[in-house]
Image (cartoon, grey):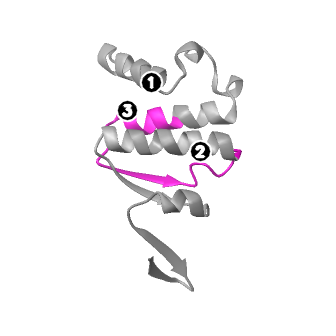
Amino acid sequence: MSVKASEQAVALLTQLGLGQRLSHLPAQLYGGEQQRVALARAFSGRPQILFADEPTGNLDRTTGDRIADELFSLKQDFATTLILVTHDRQLAARCERRLRLQDGRLEEVA
């Protein structure tokens, strides 16, 4: 990893509240911390489009809400198009456009 890439990774992890956990292994992190590492990894390449499959699925409501806040904040900061798959209606309600898969067909949700 180049010095610049390393500095960007540290900056993202610190922004996500993991500055004190940089030397920890993945197994030493809690679920929400692991998910924030995944967000940092996903956004480190400054993607134009990001696909997120159930980004809060295995988290309690409080932690899930925080991860969702961070996800949408990073989406805005990096001007990234987010395509999100979720069963969580509250999370889906935060999206600009919602589609539902019903009987093998995509339907627009009002």
x and y, in percent, of residue 58 in the image: 69, 48
Give the Cα distance between marks 1 and 3.
12 Å
Circle 3 SS class: helix
The residue type indicated by label 2 comes to Asp
Vertical comparison of 33 with 94: above or below:
above
x and y, in percent, of residue 90 in the image: 57, 59
Q: Per the image, is 48 magenta?
A: yes
Marks 3 and 2, the one that precedes in the sequence: 3
Residue tagged 3:
44
Name which quarter of the figure residue 96 lies in: bottom left
Give the Cα distance between marks 3 and 2.
22 Å
Vertical comparison of 24 with 45: above or below:
above
- The mark found on residue 15 in the picture is 1
Residue at point 52%, 45% (across, down): 68
Residue tagged 2:
65
Taking depth in this image into account, of 41 and 87 the one nearest to the observer is 87
Q: Crowding near pointer 1: few (<14 within 10 Å), some, many (20+)?
A: some
Do the residues under discs 2 and 1 have CB atoms within 8 angstroms?
no
The residue type indicated by label 1 comes to Gln
Q: Magenta part of the protein: which range?
A: 38-60
Do the residues under discs 1 and 3 have CB atoms within 8 angstroms?
no
